[in-house]
Amino acid sequence: MFNFPRPESSQSRQPFSSRSAADSAEFVELQAEVERLYFITEALWRILKEKHGLDDNELVKQITLIDIEDGKLDGRKPKAPPQPCPKCNRTVGRQRMKCLFCGEPIAQNPFDR
Ligand SMILES: [Zn+2]
């Protein structure tokens, strides 16, 4: 099995008993979402292995390359900083589909956070 560094969540530093009921419900919901994403990721990886002959070493290599893009092998991918608009060069927030100032469509990277 793989042994990647796992980011420490802020929730794990706080005692469970001090969280509100709403936070606990949200935490449980997030756990279920993460579990669902694990299933999807594993299913996609199995398809790639079976249909395209990739191996686990390639997956580990790519995960490591993504992790170290920010210079730190820490199990985290930093959020992308705001980018300049390709038309007017003003700074545009990451989540914007269009420039707030000139309306230029902004290309989205589906893996940006
Ligand atoms: Zn613009």
Image (cartoon, rainbow, N blue to C red):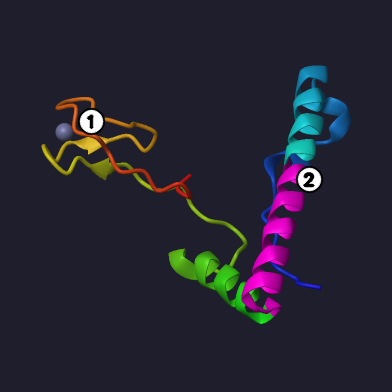
> In the rendered view, would you say 53 is above or below 10?
below
Identify the residue at image location x=11%, y=37%.
88
Asked if residue 80 is among those painted magenta in the image, a careful observer would answer: no
Report the quarter where the N terminus lies. bottom right
Residue 12 pos. (x, y %): 77, 43
**Residue 35: which disc?**
2
Q: Residue furthest front?
A: 51
Query: Contact, CB < 8 Å: mark 1 with mark 2?
Result: no
Query: How many other residues sit within 10 Å of disc 1, few (<14), some (14-19) or many (≥20)?
Result: many
* Stretch of the chain drawn in magenta: 34-56
Kindly identify the amino acid type of the residue bearing the numbered disc 1. Answer: Cys
**Residue 99: which disc?**
1
Residue 22 pos. (x, y %): 77, 18
Residue 60 pos. (x, y %): 64, 74
Kindly identify the amino acid type of the residue bearing the numbered disc 2. Answer: Glu
Query: On the picture, is 73 further left or further right than 95?
Result: right
User: Quarter-wise, where is residue 28 in the image?
Assistant: top right
- Which of pointers 1 and 2 lies earlier in the amino acid sequence? 2
Residue 71 visible in rendering: no
User: Quarter-wise, where is residue 55 in the image?
Assistant: bottom right
Q: Nearer the viewer, residue 111 or 82?
A: 111
Residue at disc 1, CB closer than 8 Å to ligand 1:
yes
Query: On the picture, is 69 further left or further right than 28?
Result: left
Q: Nearer the viewer, residue 50 or 106?
A: 50
